[in-house]
Every structure is written in structure tokens, then in C-alpha cells.
Image (tube, helix red, strand yellow):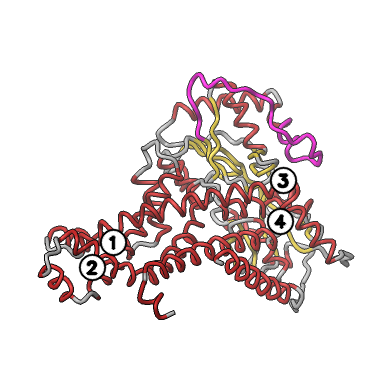
Amino acid sequence: MIKNKVVKSFIFIVVIILIFVAFLMFHSTTDVKYYNSLDELNGEKIGIATGSTFDSIIKKKLKNVDLKYYDNAVDRISALRNSKIAAYVTDDAMANEEIKNNNDLAILNEPIGVENYAYAISPNNPELKEKVDKVLLDLKKDGTLDYLQKKWMGNNESEKKLENIKLSGKNGTINFGTLATSAPFSYLKDDKIVGYDIDLMLLICDKLDYSLNVNVLDWNGLLTAVNVGKVDMAGCGIIVTKEREESMLFSVPNYKGDVVAIVLKNSISNSNVVEDIKQNFVNTFVKEDRYKLFIKGTLTTLEISILSIIFGTILGVIVGIMRVSNKKIMKFISKIFISFMQGMPITVLLLIMYYLIFVKTPLSAIVVSIITFSIYLSAYVAEMIRGGYEAINKNQIQAAYSIGFTKYQTVKYIIFPQIISYIIPIYKGQVISTIKSTSIVGYIAIMDLTKIGDLIRSRTFDAFFSLIAVALIYLLICIVFQKLLEYIEKKVNKRKQVIE
């Protein structure tokens, strides 16, 4: 019965979403304007990557530009195609990768500037910087850097494989942070993180007798992870600035490239809509067995969600009992805890837990996320318990005592069942909210469902299928949990069962 309801609800919602999205896709009336030179971009809206230093370069070259910041190439390309920006700026290596996969894009011939890229290194590890610098200089001198650049930035896809190196790890492990959305520097291919920076790090670790542990982070947390020592090094086309040098170390440059502008190509498109949709579907799910990545991401999301709900509920009951206790100190502590949790954005709390509280511990990012969401949920469960307790007619408690019930029996048979019947309708909504909130764990290097969707988007340069897939999987998970809790509610709430 529950299974049939879940399936019917899911199918109905999927159909509505697809019809709505299709309507938006095929009823676009945006006028497209084409640009052929840098001068034509004066006074226009220009897109750049969040956290990049291209803004200062653009302002020196162009006048009165309105800069728009985007987290990844897919969002920049989408904004360009929908005329939200006139062009976007990136380095030449990434630009060549993007136009190779998007026939409607072109690079303006005139470069905007030149930038050097380097590895960011923990400020507490100057010895590592010295070692890495020496290896990089040696690799540059013997032509290895040129070889790697030609391999990863060329057009021969069959050559783009990591060097076959077995690392000894005699001197320990280098924890390396990267984005994995910045081809050809670091990106996802065949269920592995590959690219110029990863290949180069393998050679560096080989020369220094280290093993390599790659951590996929979000840009907002990448440099922070270096600064606090969560990772030893980071790389994905990072530009050195004076401000960044104040909080971390940088290696000697490992790549130097032009900064260029990408615009829409002024050409007649002969693309077939049906074929394009079919190809985008294949690229998102079939190519390189990417559907397996969605499965892995879903399992990670379920692991975090289920354990957070279990532990959060248990902790919430404990805090809730403290909240309704007659002991003032327990009531005060629980009240402060609840107020603090309810006033703290979950994203901020997660970053505090990962980069401050547990930064020096061996706990994995998944464990930290489960602790965070459990604590966050417990505050709301505790308030539900308080509200349910206050809704009970206290004369029932006195009546229970008068007929010989012990305190334990009164809680078990009188108080607890009524609290459960009161809080389940509210609890359902909070559980669903917790599941959806887990979509932020990609900030701390967890390959959950949302992060997997981002990585696949960065390879296909198509937002439709990956985003829809992520949305529908979350939707299905939430429907299942909602139906399960509704079933429990009917079993627990005898009064409601009788009415129905």
C-alpha cells in the first residue's frame, strides 16, 4: 500500500516537473547579441569565477564593466547563453576545454592578461614548500612540466591518463585539496580525479617519497582548508596574490597562461534538438558509467541522513527531557543550547565543526557531518518535546499518581504516548528538512548526491539532466521518508486512527 502510494506520487510529480521544464526550455525569447572584440565588451556584464583574481585584470583592460560571479563553468556558460552576461573570463587552458565541448562558444583573439598558477601550501609547513619548490624547478628544467602541459592541454584524449606511479609513502602522506571541476587542471574521468595538477602531484610525491590523498572540496572551503591545515596543499589553477600570501604559503609557479574572454559564436546552428537531448542523456548517465556515481552519491546522502535522524532524535529526546525538567540548571543549559542551534545557519555550523572544532582530529568528513546534523536536528526535536509536554493536561499526571502509577509508568503510559502523537506531524517536516539540508556537505569534501551532480555537470557542460536527476532522487527519498512517517503516525496516534 505504502509502496504503491510512493510510486504514484513520485511519477505524478516527475511528470509535472518535466512538463514545466520543457515549457521553459522551448519557450525562450531571449535576444542574442554577438561580440567580436574586447572593445565591444566595454560597459557590458562580464562573468568570472568566484574567488578568482580576474576582476582586477578585467578592470584594467575594460571600462565600466559589471562583474557577475559564478561558482563553476556550467553556470557561466548558461548565463552566457541566456544573455545574462556578454562574456566570461577564464584562463586559456580551461577556455580551450570548454569550447571543445561547446560548439556555440568562441575565444576572443586578444588576451586580457597573463597569470601564474601555483600550489597553495599550509602556512605551518615551510619545509614542504622548500621540497616542492625544488622538485618543481627540477621538473621545469628537465622538460617534464612542458610534457605534462602538452599532454593534458592537448586534443588527444587517449593520452590524458595519470602517470603509472606506485608511491612508496615512506615519508608520510600529502593531503591534497582540489576542486575536480576545473578541467584540464583537475576533473572527474572514469570515476577518478585526474588532470594536470593531479599528475604533477603524483610526480612530486614520487620524488619526495610521499603517498597522495586527494580531497575534493568546494572553492569556498579550499583555501580555508589549507590555511587551517585540514589539507597540506591545494591546487586547481590557483593564482597567487599578496592577500593570500599573508595567510598561506605558495610554491613556485607550475603553470603560466593567458587570461581570455569567451563569447557566443556568431554562426547558424544546425543542431537537432532530439539528438542533443539524447546525447546529453548519454553524457550524463551512460558515458564512463556515470550512473554509478549517482548511486554512490545517493548512498552517501542516505548514510548521512539516516544516521543523523537516528542520533539527532535520541539526543533531542535527552535535551527535551532536560528542557522540561524541574532542575533549573538543566533547563537553562538546554534552553541556551536550543537557542544557539536554532539561531545558527546549518552551513555555518557545518563549516565551524569541520574547519575549527574537529580540524585537528582524525574524524572523517562524513562523521563530522553526521555529528553536525544530529546536533542541529536535536534542538528542534527538543522543542517539539517541550511543546508536546506543555500540551498535555497535567490533571492526567496527578490522576495517574493517585491510582498508584510510578513516575516511570506515568511517563511510559501517559506522557510519552501523548507527546509522540503531538510531535510526529511537526517531526515529519523537520526530518524532510534535514534530508534536504545534507546537500551542503560537498563544502567539506564529501562526494554526496549534490556534489556528484556538480562534478558531472562540470564534465558534460549540461545542467539539465544532472540537476533533474539530483532533484528527483532527493524527491524520491523525501517521499519515502514522508510516507514511512505517516504510516508510523497512524499506528501511534490511536485517536486519529479511530477517526479515519
Mark 3 packing: few (<14 Cα in 10 Å), some, or many (20+)?
some
- The kind of residue tagged 3 is Asp
Q: CA distance from mark 4 to mark 1?
A: 41 Å
Give the CA separation, mark 2 to mark 1: 31 Å
Choose the circle earlier in sequence order: 1 or 3. 3
Q: Nearer the viewer, residue 195 or 378?
A: 378
Q: Which residue is mark 1?
A: 340
Q: Quadrant of the C terminus?
A: bottom left
Q: Residue at x 48, y 63 (%)?
A: 484
Q: Is residue 168 magenta?
A: yes
Q: Who comes first in sequence, dot 3 or dot 4? A: 3
Discs 4/1, front: 1
Disc 2 and disc 1 in contact, CB within 8 angstroms: no
Could you say where residue 252 lies in the image, as x and y percent from the top left?
56, 33
Question: Element under label 1?
Answer: helix
Disc number at residue 461? 4
In depth, the one of 58 and 24 nearer the eye is 24
- Which residue in the structure is indicated by mark 3? 289
User: Residue type at mark 2?
Assistant: Ile
* Disc 4 versus disc 2: nearer the observer: 2
Displayed quadrant of residue 11 = bottom right
266 inside magenta stretch: no
> What residue is at 57 percent from the left and 38 percent from the top?
118
Is mark 4 in CB contact (under 8 Å) with mark 2?
A: no
Label 4 secondary element: loop
Position in image of residue 184 (x %, y %): 69, 43
Q: Earlier in the sequence, mark 2 or mark 3?
A: 3
Residue closest to the eye, 16 or 138: 16
Q: Residue 5's x, y, as percent?
A: 58, 69
Using the numbered discs, state the Cα–Cα distance from disc 3 to disc 4 in whole angstroms. 17 Å
- Disc 2 designates what residue? 414
Magenta residues, as a range? 147-175
